[in-house]
Amino acid sequence: MATQQEEETVVRVPQIVQELNQTMRSGITRTKEWRMQQLRAVLKLLEDNEERITTALAKDLGKSAHEGYLTEIVQATSSCKLAMKELNKWMAPQKVPTTLITFPGKAAIIAEPLGLALIIAPWNFPFSLVIDPLIGAISAGCAVVIKPSEITPTVSSLIADLIQKYLDKKAIHVVEGGVPVATALLEQKWDKIFYTGNPKVGRIVMAAAAKHLTPVTLELGGKCPVYIDDSVDLKVSAQRICHGKWGFNCGQTCIAPDYLLVQESIVPKLVETMKDTIVQFFGEDPSKSGDLSRIVNENHFQRLSKLLDDPRTSEKIVHGGQHVKELLFIAPTIILDIPLDTPVMSDEIFGPILPIIIIKGVDEAMDVILSFPKPLAFYVFSTKKEVQERLVIGISAGGMGVNETMMHFTIPRLPFGGVGESGMGAYHGKDSFDAFSHKKAILYKGMRGDIPARFPPYTSEKKSL
Ligand code: NAD
């Protein structure tokens, strides 16, 4: 059911789209000056508002100021600086060699803005998952409508406030609200839709885009597996896995480890080392830790509690399991030796619960991974080169880490995106620019010098030329 405010917003949507289309037609956003000026403004927005942003993140998600700064502000700032540094290069026409039949001529690829873009963002990194694609859209010269997640309302209204204060109102507009507003936006004709969120809604977005043949980038999710064998340093591995699972956003991260596939012989030692690491990170009572985010809302808390309370899961808990509704707190939880047909293994967990599946070796691990849709990320912990290679080549995933979790995300020159059910298209760095650009192929010719063989009549002598 739409709120009154959402109903009012829905009515305004066609007008907003019409105004931004007019801006797009004026050509202002295509200029290098406009793009640079807006990128500078994004940077200033980030520099001026660190405290407001981290406070809003703490209110909506219980994120510590340190985590909020690191995962949302630093990420967006480095994307913005890279775009400012490389914009000239990205915008420059790329010359390509011509052919005999086009001689004398020149050929080039010109990146042109796709046009008016819609960015729909989720709640888990509610700030950077708006700003990062926005940087791509601005760099490419697009006008933009942004729809932040309604599940993180403090961040959503902060984004609306900051964007209208710092950026060009005629070209960049924030529309707040939930599903009714998103639905109304998706009914409009866009030149590009950039959606981040769950695969179920991804399908709705793609169906809406298909009506207008609008290109989409879908940044989705899924179950991200971790493979660990007996060749690794368990302490180092446990630290990197626990950091990826619980260190950011309490497991509510699209590329957080979802489940572990652990070689039989190291299971007891790995579990003990992970338990120690959890205590080292969050203390004996993690509910008192300021470094462990909370579950975003009661709906998600109930969803995760149901997984924990399932008898087939609860009897397998070897660490954690505590959950307190009033605090929206769920402890870092390890579940050992879980059958694949339990509910915790059916969907992306997106929370602090970590199942361990015991395997004999690489073949069995591959069988399990391949029984699920292609993941957004896959992590391999092994120092054996042949195992690394086999899994790098044998498993399709959006991205991979070898002896690491999550950190590939921080390298701006690596494309970030899914494959299969975990998404389509990619962004970050130049890929963000490309996501909002069309590569226009151009052949420039003068008035002289055509090769006669191209014109009819097509005689046999001409064929041999
Ligand atoms: P969410 O509930 O905030 O939804 C995302 C956006 O979709 C919101 O703006 C929401 O208003 C909109 N939406 C929801 N239902 C809709 C509908 N029926 N029609 C149109 N729009 C609708 O966030 P979420 O989907 O719960 O986010 C978590 C998911 O996102 C996880 O699956 C996670 O893996 C994925 N994710 C992916 C990435 C990535 O970069 N690939 C990043 C973060 C999260």
Image (cartoon, helix red, strand yellow):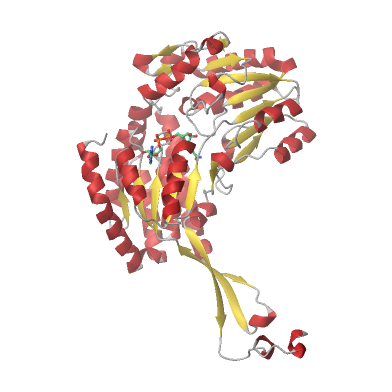
Quadrant position of the C terminus in the picture: bottom right
Q: Quadrant of residue 126?
A: top left
Q: Residue at x 47, y 42 (%)?
A: 203
x, y percentage for residue 337?
64, 15
Name of the residue lying farthest toward the top: 315
| Residue closest to the eye, 421 or 442 | 421
For this view, does 465 lie left or right of residue 8?
Answer: right
Question: Relative to 92, does residue 49 appear above or below in the rendering?
Answer: above
In percent of the image, x 36 and y 22: which residue is there?
298
Q: Quadrant of residue 117?
A: bottom left
x, y percent for residue 268: 68, 12
Q: In this image, 92 relative to 326: left or right? A: right
Q: Is residue 17 left or right of residue 96?
A: left
Residue under the point 63% across and 85% down? 104
Residue 319 in view in this figure: no
Query: Foreground residue, 44 or 292?
Result: 292
- Asked if 72 appears above or below 334 in the picture, the reply is below
> In which quadrant is the N terminus drawn?
top left
Q: In what quadrant does ligand 1 lie?
A: top left
**Where is residue 127 shown, x and y percent of the image?**
39, 39
**Above or below, 210 relative to 314:** below
Q: How many discs mark residues in the rendered view?
A: 0
Viewer can see residue 256: yes
Query: Percent from the top left, x then y, of residue 376?
Result: 57, 37
Q: Residue at x 44, y 57 (%)?
A: 139
- Is 442 positioned to the left or the right of 132 in the image? right
